[in-house]
Amino acid sequence: MPVLSIESLRKDYGKIQALKGVSFSVPKGCVFGILGPNGSGKTTLLGLIMDILKPTSGSYKLFDEEPNESHRRQIGTFLETPNFYHYLSAVQNLEISAAIKQRGKEDIEKVLETVNLSQRKHSRFSTYSLGMKQRLAIASCLLGSPEVLVLDEPTNGLDPVGIAETRELIKKLAQQGKTIIMASHLLDEVEKVCTHVAILKKGELITTGRVDEILANEDIVELGASDTVRLQQFAEQLGGYSNLKRSENLLQLYYPVGTANLERINQHFFNQGIVLNHLHLKKKSLESKFFELTN
Amino acid sequence: MNLQTDFYVIQLLKIEWLKIKNYSAFIVLGLFFLLGILGSNYAVFYLKKNIIDKADPTGMIASSSPYDFAHTWQTTSYVSGYLLLLPGLLLILLVTNEFAFRTHRQNILDGWNRKNVIDVKIAMALIAAVISTILVFITAIIFGFAAGSSFSVTHIDAVGYFFLKALSYNMIALLFAVLVRKTGFAIGLYFIYMGFENIVSGILQALSMKFKAEYGFDIGNMGDYLPMNASDGLLHFPENTITNLANNSKAMPHDYMYVSLVLALVYLFVFYAWSRNRILKTDL
């Protein structure tokens, strides 16, 4: 069951198309990165699925159901900026969040401890630094230990230690089996933290899938033959590749950049009496993706 | 209202209480309002007792105190009506704070729906109007006894009209806050609109008098048909020699009070529906 599925979601602001009919789904238990440069529609997308914005057209489902507020109570969300009452302390602010989420207050101390804010928990929010505000927002998401977290640029404004700590926290949460949907404009961050990614550019979905496939800094050789069992058997004898994957009727061999020799591969299978019906070299790298994104 | 609805509104109000109980503007404006109601009524009470009565020992201008029972309901409601800008101001602050801090969004992200966001503010407007009315009710009784008269509920309908006026002030404040979103703009708009409507109301009153005098048709004081003046027009200072002189003048248009009452209710519904629709249907 997907945690989130989006179908042709579109949002116009007057003549500007912020999101141009985007569709994808987020499987349970993954760390799903929504990657794109500033202005690509990441926050708009998250705003739409959280009912902050009204879509021009399209639809989405949360937990495979028509979305409503009870779904949002099962998701810890941090969108765009830390939104708290400036005149209240961290504890007082979290009491409000906990009450709306229909959770008890018992989690408050624990989540403040998790983000290292216990020392300042009674200070007014307005006296916090940007990094502390950000950490309080993450603490608020953790209230009630939700199974799904939606984090919009969670490391924005943090110092290097804060960034490292937040990424560690996200990984730790993922290891606990939580689904994390995270928007970021940092390719490097998505590669380090996420298992899946959707790449947005100017409101359009460029691609979506597993990070190790999409952002692989490797050459991928795709092979196909009528007898897939024998194809795999002889592929294993090939050597030189770093990884072998099977996807539907195709085999994927991952080679370090520039080492895949299609002629040799073809010859190898031909010698074994296997005629390939598909042989294709896919070149994907961080840099090429980055180029695609920013140009 | 069924049990489930009761529960729903109380749940929302409990959360709203967490937001405002430590908000200094809430405490300061609340105190100003309380002292303002007591102070302004005391000022009128004192003025009549110690200045007018001494200057006019024969009672030509006004023989009895405006705070004698029967009159105290009208006087207290009328005098206190000028202070209703304060709860309106507080409502603007409470609503625009949510926009400024973006907590209206966070409340939704945390698990409210859009209906909860606006319903709780409408409930606050209603509660502020009820509390204002209770204050006026108690103040009217205190000054009624202080004036040395015996208790009477004649003219107590004035307190009901005060409630309607209080709710109108709060609901238009809520509407402006929801439409404008920025604290300074909303407060400015609120005060400017109140002043502007009074000027237009004055012009419409003059026009109504002109129509009556020149063409002989009397559709009442058109100034009392404007959104805020409709509920304002329901409250009058108790009759005395001076007000009688003014009201009984043949130049004055007839006071169609029921038209003002119906219009005040219609305007209230417009403020309610417009602010609710705004939150339910647009981007937040």
Image (cartoon, rainbow, N blue to C red):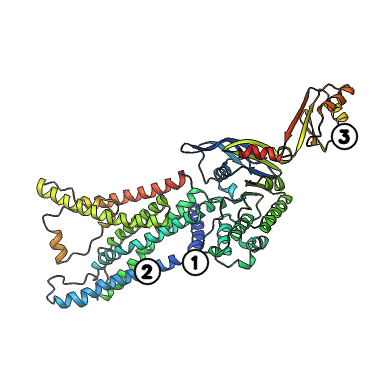
* Residue A175 higher or lower than B138, as above or below: above
Residue B158: horizontal and vertical position, in percent?
Answer: 27, 61
Count the marks: 3
Residue A174: horizontal and vertical position, in percent?
Answer: 71, 50
Mark 2 lies on a secondary structure that is helix
Pair 3/1: label in front = 3
Which residue is the site of mark 3?
A239
Chain label for disc 3: A
Which residue is the site of mark 1?
B22
Query: Residue flagged by tag 1: what amino acid is it?
Result: Asn
Determine the residue positioned at 38% across, 55% down. Answer: B186
* CA–CA distance in space, label 2 to label 1: 17 Å
* CA–CA distance in space, label 3 to label 2: 84 Å
Tag 3–tag 1 contact (CB < 8 Å): no
Query: Residue flagged by tag 2: what amino acid is it?
Result: Phe
Q: Is residue A143 visible?
A: no
Chain label for disc 2: B
Q: Is residue A286 visible?
A: yes
Query: Residue flagged by tag 3: what amino acid is it?
Result: Gly
Determine the residue positioned at 66% across, 37% down. Answer: A208
Determine the residue positioned at 35% across, 47% down. Answer: B270
